[in-house]
Image: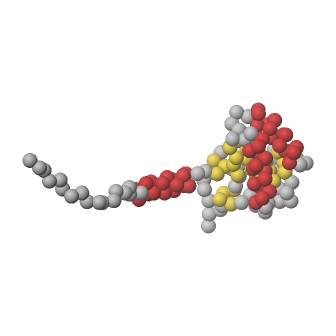
Amino acid sequence: MKFNRPKSRSEEVFINLTPLIDVVFLLLIFFMVSTTFVTIRQGIKVDLPKTTTPQEKVRQHIVISITKDGHIYLGKRWVKNEKTLLALLRDRIKEEKEKLVLINADKEVKHGRVVRVMDLAKRAGAEKIGVLTTPEKEG
């Protein structure tokens, strides 16, 4: 007895990526909304940029301040050049269990200067780098 096989249809099989993309966007939105910024009141007086996100209380951390005229301070100590900053940062980071460095840059400081200091902090061994802001006044 001979059985007839049904003729196979050549249908293309594909994976629908729409649900995956939806989940990725939801995760992205969640992390953007839940990110917090840090506020600190120590070291050198600089005019910080404003933010509307909630502020987080901070313990004593390693703070690098960059003034409007480009001078760099580690805590309250003025640092002459980047080589000195790198050496001082390495020493301070070795002492810290949470290897967090906070950048306290005036809002008028050029972006490239801040990025350069972030790079120095990373090379010194910082595992986390934060940028300090001040809360924007409502109204």
Q: Position of residue 111 (x, y in %)?
A: 76, 60
Q: Is residue 87 left or right of residue 3?
A: right
Q: Is residue 51 left or right of residue 78?
A: left
Could you tell me if residue 10 is visible in this image? yes
Foreground residue among 96 and 24: 24
Foreground residue among 126 and 65: 126
Residue at 33 percent of width and 59 percent of height = 12
Foreground residue among 12 and 66: 12
Could you tell me if residue 46 is visible in this image? no
Q: Position of residue 135 (x, y in %)?
A: 66, 57
**Residue pushed farthest left?**
1
From what the image shows, is residue 32 above or below residue 86? below
In terms of image quadrants, where is residue 92? Answer: top right
Residue at 76 percent of width and 33 percent of height = 94
From what the image shows, is residue 92 above or below residue 45? above
Residue at 73 percent of width and 47 percent of height = 102
Quadrant for the C terminus, please: bottom right
**Residue pushed farthest bottom?**
139
